[in-house]
């Protein structure tokens, strides 16, 4: 017996398969992204950055304490340091990196990159939020701590 798949049957089968796939995909995309933040307990801008990350879909675990031992543990040279450090998956996130840049890193997984940094404390980065907006650059870095431009933020 030969089965003929009509256009309507084919479209129905495709739609059913897509719906079956879309539900779990949508749930996975909406799942919170875990991130661990190391920060000085007295730093207010770090707390505001944590709030930014939570609002952007991250589940944040905060470890308060002195930062020198943290930077030494993760081998972050002084020229790449900021006021806090986070780990997301296998990546290091140093400073006020926007949540969208962290998500992009986790999605794209660029070869050789071990982390992102905004050295210092750019005044318009998340958590600082100084007006008027001042452009800043997010850098990626490799295991040797050599940097490349990952993202430019030229406007609010």
Image: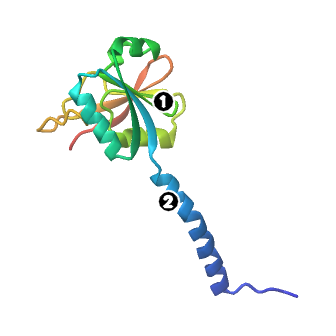
Residue pictured at 61% horizontal, 74% vertical:
16
Residue pictured at 35% horizontal, 40% vertical:
99
Residue pictured at 50% horizontal, 57% vertical:
27
Residue beneath label 1, please? 91
Disc on the earlier residue, 1 or 2: 2
Q: Position of residue 52 (x, y in %)?
A: 29, 41
Circle count: 2
Q: Position of residue 130 (x, y in %)?
A: 14, 35
Residue beneath label 2, please? 26
Residue 4 drawn above or below residue 29: below
Q: Residues within 10 Å of mark 2 (few under 14, many from 20)?
A: few
Q: Which residue is more in the foreground, 61 or 115?
A: 61
Q: Quadrant of the C terminus?
A: top left
Q: Quadrant of residue 152?
A: top left
Residue 82 - label: none
Q: Which residue of the protein is positioned furthest toward the right in this rendering?
A: 1
Q: Position of residue 64 (x, y in %)?
A: 34, 22
Residue 25 drawn above or below residue 95: below
Left-right relation of 17 to 45: right
**Disc 1 to disc 2: CB gap under 8 Å:** no
């Amino acid at each position: 017996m030969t089965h003929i798949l009509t256009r309507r049957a084919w479209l129905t089968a495709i739609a059913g398969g897509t719906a079956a796939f879309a539900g779990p995909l949508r749930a996975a995309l909406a799942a919170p992204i875990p991130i661990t933040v190391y920060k000085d307990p007295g730093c207010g801008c770090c707390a505001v950055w944590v709030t930014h990350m939570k609002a952007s879909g991250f589940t944040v675990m905060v470890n308060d304490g002195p930062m020198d031992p943290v930077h030494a543990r993760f081998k972050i040279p002084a020229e790449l340091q900021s006021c806090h450090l986070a780990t997301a998956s296998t990546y290091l996130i140093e400073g006020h990196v926007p949540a969208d840049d962290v998500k992009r890193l986790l999605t794209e997984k660029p070869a050789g990159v071990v982390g992102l940094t905004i050295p210092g404390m750019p005044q318009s980065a998340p958590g600082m939020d100084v007006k008027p907006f001042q452009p800043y650059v997010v850098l990626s870095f490799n295991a040797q701590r050599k940097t490349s431009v990952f993202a430019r933020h030229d406007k609010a």
